[in-house]
Structure formats: C-alpha cells, structure tokens
Image (cartoon, coloured by chain):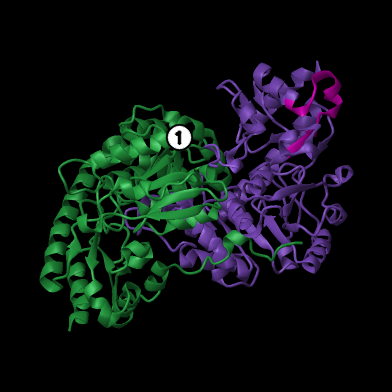
Chain colours: A purple, B green
Amino acid sequence: MKSTILADRAQGMEKTILRQIVDLADASCINLGLGELSFPPPKAVTEELSREIGRWPLGYTSNAGLPELRALIAARSGMEIDADRVCVTAGSEEAIFLTLAVLVNPGDEVLIPDPGFSSYPKIVRLWGGVPISYGFDRANRFALQTERIEAVLTSKTKAVILNSPNNPSGTVYARDELQRLAAVLNDRGITAISDEVYKEIFFGETSPASISRWAPTAVVVDSLSKSYAMTGWRLGWCIVPPQLVKPIIGVHQLAVTCASTVSQRAALIALGGGAEDEKRRNVEELRRRRGLALGCLRNTLGLPLIEPAGSFYILVDVSSWQARWGSSLDIAVRLASEHKVITIPGIAFGPGGEGYLRLSFAGTPEDFAEGVRRISCLLA
Amino acid sequence: MKSTILADRAQGMEKTILRQIVDLADASCINLGLGELSFPPPKAVTEELSREIGRWPLGYTSNAGLPELRALIAARSGMEIDADRVCVTAGSEEAIFLTLAVLVNPGDEVLIPDPGFSSYPKIVRLWGGVPISYGFDRANRFALQTERIEAVLTSKTKAVILNSPNNPSGTVYARDELQRLAAVLNDRGITAISDEVYKEIFFGETSPASISRWAPTAVVVDSLSKSYAMTGWRLGWCIVPPQLVKPIIGVHQLAVTCASTVSQRAALIALGGGAEDEKRRNVEELRRRRGLALGCLRNTLGLPLIEPAGSFYILVDVSSWQARWGSSLDIAVRLASEHKVITIPGIAFGPGGEGYLRLSFAGTPEDFAEGVRRISCLLA
C-alpha cells in the first residue's frame, strides 16, 4: 500500500518553541533571544568583496570546497591534518546534518546535551536515530561530567554530540573532563561530534579545549557565523576522520552541491587573517557587554544565574517564579506578549533547561538593560 | 548490536562516473563536459552587490527566505500562488533533496528519467526510496511519452521526477503530453517533481510548458544557476503544494538553516529585472553557439545526434563506434586520457543514455571546435 502523502520523518514538523516565541514578537519588542551578534561582518571581508566580486570566478567549486580554503581550515585547526579531511558546508548545521547522515542507522542512539541546541534531537530523528539526553552538573554551572554520559551509553550508542562553549549554558567543558570522556569513547568506538562554533568567544584565560585532541575519530564542526559575525553567509565546515571523508562529501553533494562560492571567497579573507583584529575587538566588546549584562541582571532581578565562560548567553534561574507564573515557556510567552521582551525559555533546549530563561547579550547593552527592566515587571 | 561505523545509506558513496572522467582532466584538456555557462554573473548583480554589500543586513533570514524574495518568486512563477508556498534553498539540488525527504518512506518508488541527471536516483536512495527508471521515445528525439511512465507506475509510486528542458537530451516536453501525464498523476495522487532549471534556455518559439499548470500538487524546482549563470551562488527554490510547506521548511532548517543571505540579496537583483537584458543576450549567444556546435559536429564527425530544443547539451550518437572502441564510458575515458577532451558518457545518466556522448556548448565555440577535432581522432 502506498503511504499517505507525507513521509513519516516529515510528520510533526511543527513550529518549534523558539519559533512560537519569535512569532509573538513585533517591532516594539526588545529581543534578548538573539542567536547572532549585532556586529556587521568584518570590514576586510566586505571591502575586498566589494572590490573583487567582478573579478572572481564564481562557478561551482569542488563539492568539498575550494582547495585553498580546505587547506587554510586544516592549517588553522591545530589538528595536524591534511586538507582532504575538511568538508566546507553551508553552515555548521549542515555539517552536523551530514555527520549524522553518514553515521546513524535506524535505531542507533546518539547522545545529545540537555540542555542543548534544539536542532540536535531533530536531526538525529530525521535520520532515523534515537536521541538520548545526557545532563550536566547543575550545581556546578552545568559542568560536563563523563559519568553522566557513561550512565546512558548502550550497545546502540553511535555518537555523542558535544558543544563547548555550550549553548545555552555558556559552559566551557573542562580539559581533563574531555580527556577522560575521550578515553571512554575511544574504548567503545563511539564517535564524538564536537560542535565548536562558539569556541572563539570565551572569557577565561585559555581557549576552550577540543576533544579532538584526545579522540582521533572525533568530528569537529565549526563556522564563520559566531566568530566573525557572519551568520547569513552560511559557511561552516567539518573536519572528519579519514573513513568519513568520502561519505560526507557524497551526501553533501546530493544536499547542496557545494557551499556558496561567494561565501567561500569571504571565508578565505576572514580566515586568511584579514579579520583577526576586528574579531578580537568584537570579543573584547562582548566581554564588556557580558560584564554589564551580569551587573544589570544582579541589580535589577537579583535571581541566581549561570556566569558564562563562553558564548553570548546567560541562563537566568526563574524557578522561584514558577509557582506564580508557571513554566519557563509560560513565562517567556507572557514576557513576549505582555511585556514586549523576547527571551528563550529553557525548555526549548530540553527538560534540563526548565526553570531557566536564556538571555542573549549579543545585542547592545542599552537594549539588554531595557529588556531586563521589562522582565522585572514580573517581580512586582 | 551496534552497526559498523558507517550508516547503510553512506555505503558505496564512491566516485560517480562523471567524477571519474573529470579526474582524468588536466590543464591541457578541452572541457566539453561543462554543466555551467562560461558567462560571468550579471553585471547588475555584481555592481549592486559591490556598492551595497557594506550596507545590507547579512544575518540569518527566515528559514524559508527573505519575504520579498519569496513574493518575487511567487509573482514570477505564473502560478497564481501566495509567497508562503515558496521555499528558498541552497540551489535546486537542495530543493529536490528536501522534496524527496518529505515524500519518500522506505520502499516508496520514485520514477526518474533515463537518461537523466545522475543525482536523482542517489537522492531517492538516500531517503530509503527505490528509483524506478522511465524511458523516452528515442526514435523521436527522446520525447516524453506518458505511456512509458504509466507502464512503470505501481501502488508504491510516490512521485515522478520530470526535467524539461532535459539534461542530457535537451528535449523540451510537449505541452499536450504533460497535460496527459498530469491527468494520470492527479488521478492516482502521485506528486510530480518538475525540475525546471533549464527552462529559460530554449531555442523554439514558445517557452517550455510546466506540468504545474495541470497538476495542482506538483512541486516546481528552479534556480539562478543556469538562467543567470550563477551556479556558485547556490540559490534555488521550490514551489510546493500547501501540505508540503511546513515539512519542507522544517527539513530545510535542519539541513542549512537558510540559503546564503548574500545570494538571496543577489537573487532579488537578478529576478527583480536588473539582469533580464543580460540573460536575453546570453540566451541569444547560446543560440548562436548551438548553431555553430551542430554545424561543427555534422562537418567533423558526421554522426547522428539529438538537436536540443533547450539546455546547452547535445547528445551525439556514438553507437557506431562501440564495436571498435567499447562502451560510452570506454570512449569518454579514452578521449579524456589520450586525446585530452572531456565528454560525458551517456551511461552517466542511466542505461538509457548508453551509446551517446553528451557534449556541452556552454563554453566558447573555439573550444567546442577544438574539442570536436580531438574527438574526431577516433574516426581514423
């Protein structure tokens, strides 16, 4: 018998929680839900593009990307790898999408962070896999704990998605914990998928560690989006172990042929060094905004919160409001519709995020302060 | 038990026939395998982009694309549809990829043209479907014949992929045949997926017809790539029936988030009218190149061939050479490695293409003539 018109995997592609909130927004809203920086793309990129666009060859590139871009990404990775292990993608989400496509058979389990980026479980399900959540040490700023991952490993576990700095908690996973986890995964032949898109946005002394240093079969996912304020350019990449190179490029070819050639050219400029100063200034500015945001939250709301070590999000603990205002979703809906401020309810990132709101300090400090003032209306 | 590292769908993602040939190419080769025009992108696009890139907001767009771009595509479609039936994609291949994702359950059959674009069967298989080939009237320039499609319809047939003008045959499907086919598919609730990327490149009096005129549930796929010589920009779209809108956008979001914002801005310029004159000149130039190419082939090779009504390909019948030189693949490999001319063997498009070579006249007439001279070495 022919099935109904929609494939099973396409059933229930309804609005996400995030979308529900964003759809409540109007022009009068302050948006603290932002997932992108308010900075423009680097001047070096737009200026060179402006000068050279008429001279560049802008046809198809190789499916895996311009050879010189793959080489540059490999050289900057700190991983001592050949360029042929790099696949340039239409943003980091495609990189995760492709990685799961080539790893996941129906019924395979993939461990996902809870709270974590809401697309992870959906992509796992799209490929027929079963997303299994692992939690964090909430008492310790959502720190990674290898035992929590070990506790949910089964013979069906195919991969573990890691995201450090983490969205939404801003946690940077500890070096020794990643090393410990790598040993466990190596032992069992489980692939680590390390989503490192926030790795250049950190506020501590040392840059976030990558599990790839200890896990030779790890897949590393990164992009221009957050580091270079270039979200709309859809330019990401994955660095994959040798046995995944051909399959990843094969699925990538069927999905999008190649990443935008214009964006690949822009990546050559950004990653080639032209945008480093601007990126550093942006991170410094974010550090300033983070300080202002934390001060503002403490002064205005006085609620517990997670001080982020990376990313541009702060989780604010609103559990003390729940008796009066309901779930994090109820609170976010009320804030958006009645008080004209967009926040992301923690539940959007999984049950582990319940009781929190995620606030972004990627926008201006003035907007942040006004947004928090609006949130404070619920204090009354 | 955990399966081996690679998912089943990722097994056998080996080199395509096309890639095998292209990998034989070196700088001394003439490339008659080209799948893209030798023209630059429209001046209107690069000039406005050059002026405005620093002023455009270049963050994420809505997943389905900029509202004004969706509206423009809807208005130009001639289909009397609302903008919300348009999903802007990272090229037309993503549009086909998404459409099959939301339609195909494991075991569902999808009819594909033979000869036809080599990615069709691969995408069908990637989503667990079974590609079933349908042939054409070879005696009549590979004309579409509804009976050939009817002959392979089963209770499992979910969709039929159409491609007019056709790659590789250059055939434009006849209006009355499309109307007849639409009636058959409507009756059975089968979705037509109409890949119309070559629709602006035609050499007859009237523009190619679209089955969407008679099949209200058809999915129409198009892009900037061939019409505007903008392959590397990865900007395509699909127009889908109402019940597919949410699922398509849902999978699109998980695959790439949104199409490149820079490319979407470029599309607004190109489709907004700024590039129409240049497009018309390009098609006129292609008409000239087609005439020169046909003359050259007749004078130099004297083989039967399919005069294309659209696209920029010519199928040359080399079956009379097969006793001496082997299959179309053998011939193409010999031409690439010994005579330094790249051609695409018909078998790359399916068994229905065997006995032919596909030659592209998208490059310069001088290159075409030199390429054909090299092919003629096999005449000796």
Q: Residues within 10 Å of mark 1 (few under 14, many from 20)?
A: many
**Can residue B260 be seen at all in this image of the molecule?**
no
**Residue at the image point whose x is 41% and y is 27% from the top:** B82
On the picture, is A89 further left or further right than A329?
left
Instruction: Report which residue position mark 1 lands on.
Output: B66
Task: Indicate the amino acid at tag 1.
Answer: Leu
**Residue at the image point whose x is 68% and y is 36% from the top:** A360
Q: Position of residue A143 (x, y in %)?
A: 83, 49
In this rendering, the answer to whether B353 lies above or below B151 is below
- State the residue in front, B26 or B309: B309
- State the residue in front, B350 or A354: B350
In magenta segment, residue A299:
no
Q: Position of residue A317 (x, y in %)?
A: 82, 32
In this rendering, the answer to whether B234 lies above or below B76 is below
In this rendering, the answer to whether A45 lies above or below B300 is above
In this rendering, the answer to whether A215 lies above or below B204 is below
**Can residue A141 be seen at all in this image of the molecule?**
yes
**Residue at the image point whose x is 27% and y is 47% from the top:** B43
Q: Position of residue A155 (x, y in %)?
A: 80, 60
- State the residue in front, B213 or A138: B213
- Quadrant where the image shows the C terminus of chain A: top right
Q: Position of residue A276 (x, y in %)?
A: 57, 56
Write down the quadrant of residue B337 in the picture: bottom left
In magenta segment, residue A318:
yes
On the picture, is B140 further left or further right than A191?
left
Kindly state the secondary structure of the residue where label 1 is placed: loop
Count of numbered labels shown in the rendering: 1
Query: What's drawn in magenta, residue-wise?
Result: A314-329
Write down the quadrant of residue B31 in the picture: bottom left
- State the residue in front, A14 or B369: A14
